[in-house]
Amino acid sequence: MSSLNGSDQGSVKEPSWILFVSGPTGSGKSSVAKFLASKLGAHFLEGDDLHPKANIDKMHRGEPLTDADRQGWFEAIDEQASAYNRQQSQHHHLIITCSALKRAHRDILREGCDRAWYSLMHFFFLDAPESLLRQRTEARQNHFAKSNLVHSQFEVLERPRIDEYDATIISVVPPLDEVQAETLKVATQLLSNERAYK
């Protein structure tokens, strides 16, 4: 996985931050992440676009991904996050969608962001009952992740625990506009606190 060296760090003119919008398929990650990016002036990156073709083919067939399948995906996300921070001189803030279902997945992303010198990294974990997410995925069209993948994701799902201080669980049972408003409220407070300590 890629990392930044000291000279790269010196080229950054202001602290950069990165937010991951995570959760199972059907939880509304893209809608929430795009909303946050527009409100916070950050760059949006759709994590699903970084899946290797083999992963996409598996999900098209309704086959769940293994951790081995996800390894290359996490490496691609890390590379994009590192490259973005390295190339931008200002306003180099990033919001990425990534399921990050397990703590081990989140730890991989934490390590990459730490090496990339992001001053703040936080997960917003979008949560809802399995039945609701199955219903939502059945209703959507033109997405390679089908509703039958929801159950397999819940079988391995590890919601952030209380000791994961850089993660906030957001219920997506309410309407989307309420979910977006709540996530923005938490993100704004996080960034305000970050600036206060600089």
Image (cartoon, helix red, strand yellow):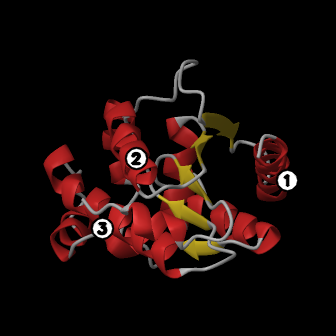
Q: Which residue is mark 3?
A: 76
Q: Which residue is mark 2?
A: 150
- Percent across and percent down for residue 169 are 64, 35
- Name which quarter of the figure residue 165 lies in: top right
Task: Mark yes or no: residue 90 visible.
Answer: yes
Image position of 180 (left or right of 126): right
Q: Amino acid at mark 3?
A: Ala
Foreground of the two, 133 or 11 = 11
The secondary structure type at the circle numbered 2 is: helix
- Percent across and percent down for residue 189 are 84, 44
Q: Pick whichever of labels 3 and 2 is earlier in the sequence.
A: 3
Q: Estimate the spatial distance between the alpha carbons at disc 2 and disc 1, rounded to whole Å.
A: 25 Å
- Percent across and percent down for residue 175 are 79, 52
Q: Residue at x 70, y 70 (%)?
A: 37
Q: Pick whichever of labels 3 and 1 is earlier in the sequence.
A: 3
Q: Which residue is mark 1?
A: 181
Foreground of the two, 165 or 28 = 165
The secondary structure type at the circle numbered 1 is: helix
As drawn, 17 above or below 41:
above
Image position of 83 (left or right of 27): left
Answer whether labels 3 and 1 touch (C-beta < 8 Å): no
